[in-house]
Amino acid sequence: VQLQASGGGLVQPGGSLRLSCAASGRGFKSTAWYRQAPGKQREWVARITAGGDTDYTDSVKGRFTISRDIRKNEVYLQMNSLKPEDTAIYYCNAVRGSATFWGQGTQVTVSS
């Protein structure tokens, strides 16, 4: 299984970005986005289950939306109203059975 994350970049505060995660495999129990800011531990951001249920960490609720395209086997993270504290490397994650898979990160920088 390979997960390919893309869509990061530099954006001003209040701006938007859309991250994409393309998966080479199927049958995942859930797919999620995590992020890691400089000097901090990696933290969970959002998750979408096989059944389509979604959940978010409190700091992004109302600003970020996780979605998926089953036909394309891709998961997205729409990020609106970005703040400097959202600056981090964002990673996609997928769980299938007892196995957890990680993609490479994509850098998101929120700065004026």
Image (cartoon, grey):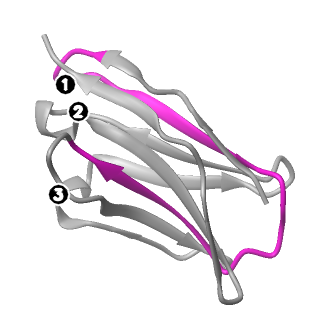
How far apart marks 3 and 1 lie (CA) works out to 15 Å
**Residues at marks 3 and 1 touching, judged by CB atoms closer than 8 Å:** no
Tell me if residue 84 comes above or below residue 75 in the rendering: above
Tell me if residue 11 comes above or below residue 64 in the rendering: above
Give whichever of discs 3 and 2 has the lower sequence position. 3
Instruction: Point out which mark residue 59 bears.
Output: 3
Tell me if residue 92 comes above or below residue 110 in the rendering: below
Which residues fall within the magenta stretch? 11-37
Amino acid at dot 1: Gly
Reading the image, the residue beneath label 2 is: 82
**Residues at marks 3 and 2 touching, judged by CB atoms closer than 8 Å:** no
Residue for point 47% across, 68% down: 47
Reading the image, the residue beneath label 1 is: 14
- Mark 3 vs mark 1: in front: 3
Give whichever of discs 3 and 1 has the lower sequence position. 1
**Residues at marks 1 and 2 touching, judged by CB atoms closer than 8 Å:** yes
Amino acid at dot 2: Leu
